[in-house]
Amino acid sequence: MSKLVPKVPKVPSVTGASRRAAYAASTRKALIDVAEDLFTAKGYAGASLDAIVAGARVTKGALYHHYSGKQALFEAVFERVEGDASRRIQKALRTGKDPWKKASNGLRAFLEVVQEPRYRRIVIQDGPAVLGYERFREQEERSTFANVLDIVRSVLDAGGWGLDEQMLQTFARIFFGAMSSAGESVASADEPAEAADRVESAIGFLLAGVQSLIESGSELPNAFLTHEIPVVEIDAED
Amino acid sequence: MSKLVPKVPKVPSVTGASRRAAYAASTRKALIDVAEDLFTAKGYAGASLDAIVAGARVTKGALYHHYSGKQALFEAVFERVEGDASRRIQKALRTGKDPWKKASNGLRAFLEVVQEPRYRRIVIQDGPAVLGYERFREQEERSTFANVLDIVRSVLDAGGWGLDEQMLQTFARIFFGAMSSAGESVASADEPAEAADRVESAIGFLLAGVQSLIESGSELPNAFLTHEIPVVEIDAED
DNA sequence: CATCCGACATACCGCAAGTACGTACTTTGA
DNA sequence: TCAAAGTACGTACTTGCGGTATGTCGGATG
């Protein structure tokens, strides 16, 4: 015998969840949606909780029931934005036949993501200050940075030249920083498309250069590695 | 630098300014000194103006007479910290005979600066959020980034191969981002000294790689895009 | 159907940034 | 030399906002 299913009004069906849980989930989503918009538009400090709860058509009671405070709400928004970005990049990384093509596609995706206002404002600009640098980095560590590490590893280690793991991580971090900074220059360039091209070829150049050096097994011009470190004294003038 | 000793403002003979101007300058310096300490220790949001003016032994009236608000005060602190760092790096860049040594020395100085709490907190962590990314970047543009641009130019263009100016800037920005990110990893590493060594050799690798590619006359723009670079086949996993 | 508890709403508190205004000292001009 | 003027503050207050304490309503549950 078939049981009549009570029709739930408009609330997205969170399967298996109770009626109230669905309402609550909807409320949380509304809060995060509005918060994301306001944090993007006004920044963390500029977006008041009153404005957020008003936009979500709830009250501060609801907000504080679901989140411990403003920072926790920001964290939820941050994770969603960062997660979306990471997944988009990861998806792009899977397209392409060889490591180079994958790297190129991934870089493209990254350069596009970094141009989006919400990513720039929430992740890049406000993220470190609000979450603290430590928390900010450990978040990136297991999302976007992980992607970069993967691709750097596949490109630099493809030939099977043993490359020290720590060194690989160092390279990955360097490339990650390079991409972040380059992405910012792309986002604020007069002609983002051209800037993106330049960035892409420049990074490709770096990768290719390293690869060729490793390949040739050269000792390379390491004036860099072997020399005395001069001590720079601080001049305290004012 | 916690100075709690009651101090009569010195009127340096070099300053031909009036008596009152000297007092005012002393007040400003006291404010910035204390603000720098508190911003470093507690962060921008965590440091209250009441605490700052109390530390400087003045009142908010004095603060608002000299600065338009908290942000303006932070800006003054920011500029001093950034300026100091930039000058230290610039000084290090002048030591060494060839471009490579200079680059190495400059990088060393940078890696040391980026480990200092005040620089990490005020410039890296809170800077972008408080000043806004635009303002933050234009500040770095004419200080630290300018140094990087100089050294990248001298290293990559030492041979006299003409390198497109925009491309040079792109490289410089990439290296700047690479150094920033790498510096952060150095600062939070278990063994900063070893991490610094790895970063130095990695960056040296990148520079050398680019140099060798340019030397060998590889075509720059499409190296990455068209996948003409020497590539070793590997078995793709999917 | 009685009870409970989760999911909110309302009212209020305290802190911190910013402002209005008063005042003493210092320079300046006749 | 002396008063007018303006700088360099100090004091007291307002305001906005994050956070909290507490009340309440309706779906869930036995």
Image: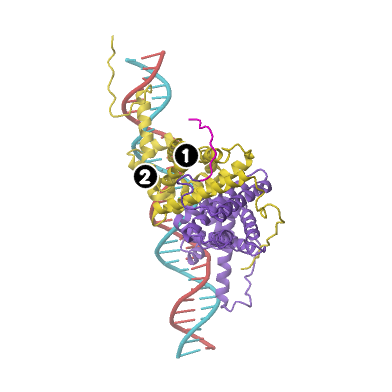
Chain colours: A yellow, B purple, C cyan, D red
Q: Can you identify the residue that label 2 sits on?
A: A37
Amino acid under label 2? Asp
Is residue A154 placed above or below B110 in the rendered structure? Answer: above
For the residue pair A85 and B198, the one nearer the viewer reads as B198
Amino acid under label 1? Lys
Q: Residues within 10 Å of mark 1 (few under 14, many from 20)?
A: many
Q: Is residue A27 magenta?
A: no
The answer to whether residue B47 is seen in the rendering is no
For the residue pair C15 and B72, the one nearer the viewer reads as B72
For the residue pair B103 and A77, the one nearer the viewer reads as B103
| Residue at screen point 37% across, 46% down | A38
Instruction: Please give the label number shown on residue A102.
Output: 1
**Is B104 on the left or on the right of A88, as rendered?**
right
Snapshot quadrant of residue B92: bottom right
Whether labels 1 and 2 belong to a single chain: the reply is yes
**Is C13 on the left or on the right of A13, as rendered?**
right
Q: For mark 2, name the chain.
A: A
| Residue at screen point 51% across, 30% down | B237
The residues tagged by marks 1 and 2 sit, at their Cα atoms, a distance apart of 32 Å
Q: For mark 1, name the chain.
A: A
Q: Residues within 10 Å of mark 2 (few under 14, many from 20)?
A: some
Residue bounds of the magenta highlight: B229-238
Q: Give x and y (percent) for residue B6.
A: 65, 65
